Amino acid sequence: MTMLTRRFALAGLAGTGLIGTGLLGRRPAFAQAAEGPFKLEPLPYSYDQNEPHIDAQTMELHHDKHHASYVEKLNQAVSGHGELASQPLHEILAKLDSVPEDVRKAVRNNGGGHANHTMFWQVMGGSGGAPSGELAEAIDRDLGGFEAFKTAFNQAGADQFGSGWVFVTVTGDGALALTSRPNQDTPLMDGQMVLFGNDVWEHAYYLKYQNRRAAYLEAWWNVVNWEVVAQRYAAAKAGTLTI
Amino acid sequence: MAFTLPELPYAHDALAPYMGEETLQLHHGKHHQTYVTNLNNLIAGTDLENKSLEEIVVISSKDPTKAGIFNNAGQHWNHNLFWRTMKKGGGGKPGGELLKRIEHDFGGYETFAEQFKQAGVTQFGSGWAWLSLDGDKLKVSKTPNGSNPLVDGATPILGVDVWEHAYYLDYRNRRPDYLAAFLNHLVDWEAVEAELAKASA
């Protein structure tokens, strides 16, 4: 199926619940994925869910090609190391030093990429707005209030030279902090928990925003799913948040 | 003296379809221009203001407090070389003295081409792949973000930009296809030979 006809097909199916259920057939990226313990989960919504802020073509490439490639290469990296294949990803990333040296860089890059994108799809697909309840209180307390926090988050994204991510980390006590990392590194590699984050690799925004990363960062807030972020916040405090 | 954006040595549509018109307009007119503007702003009134671009790259690479200067100076230098070593109808195998040097140092053009493409494919995230003169030997390497082999004392004579902005509009995620097209259709080998002569002098 060409990209154009797929876009039309998906436009017709949006909201029917058929996306990602397998009824559309297996996508080539899945079929090509190496056998291994790590799996690319389907997007939890249709490719056009985040339109017009994030375009459907970007979502399709980002999930089916970029994320799929991280999963495939992560599986390749752990294939000769059974002890890694049986561990949860966040635990592997928290102690990269103990990953065998011959695959450490591959696990760091591709394991980080798998964890970051798994989180990323979850916290998008919403309709923006502002957080509420306990999460809003934590943002007020730790990050200077929602508006000041958004400005600081966007600035951190603009300041990340080259590929990388902006993150909000959360502790078991519910304390929040803003941070950024290059490439596919993640605070999980420092044993921290990630509440949510935004991808500032150019592939995340170039088709729609080109060089205007600041416009992408600003628009991204319109698709954040604050309900999911609040669930992740509760999970962090309950000790059940992983990636 | 302030640095300026060099003119492209060809029209914006000259390298299509291997490097599209929109890509060149954005890459030269927006990305490269931004590096030049940022560099000028960052060095204004500092002791780097009157240094050469090469000096600024090397000095700032050794000082973590000058990371912003290093990023933008490196990218200005990198793009200057990138633009002047491509042409319409370029690519394929080089000739003359350059081919002899490549055959001597890599064992053949094909071996060099494979190493160069491999360096580009394996540069994780944004960065560059290079052919440099290191001492009296040609060498392939890769560097992240705005860095380049000048910081290790080598002189690049060919570089390919593997930041996604260099190829995403034309090739999407297919970086290997972009690297193959760069070698097969875009490199101005005469310009690269001139860079080699300059670096050897």
Image: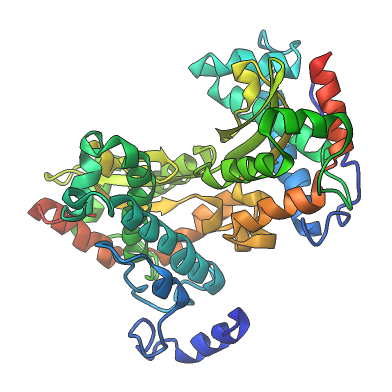
Residue situated furthest left in the rendering: A238
Q: Residue at x 28, y 51 (%)?
A: A78
Left or right of B18, for residue B8: right
Q: Outermost residue, top direction?
A: B47
Q: In the rendered image of this protein, does residue B154 appear above or below residue A203?
A: above
Residue B182 rendering spot, x and y as whole percentages: 74, 50
Residue B83: x %, y % from top left? 81, 40
Say whether residue B29 is left or right of residue B60. right
Between A43 and B3, which is closer to the camera in this rendering? A43
The reply to whether residue A108 is visible in this rendering is yes
Judge by depth and name the residue closer to the eye, B133 or B114: B114
Q: Position of residue A167 (x, y in %)?
A: 35, 46
Residue at image point 39% right, 84% down: A19
In which quadrant of the rendered image does the C terminus of chain A lie? Answer: bottom left
User: Is residue B177 or residue B26 the one in the foreground?
Assistant: B177
Left or right position of B56 against A151: right
Res B6 visible: no
The answer to which image quadrant residue A8 occupies is: bottom right
Residue at image position (91%, 46%) is: B10
Quarter that holds the N terminus of chain A: bottom right
At 85% across and 41% down in the image, what residue appears? B188
Left/right of residue B103 with respect to residue A93 in the rendered view: right
Residue A43 falls in image quadrant: bottom left
Against A153, is B141 above or below? above
Q: Is residue B145 above or below residue A204?
A: above
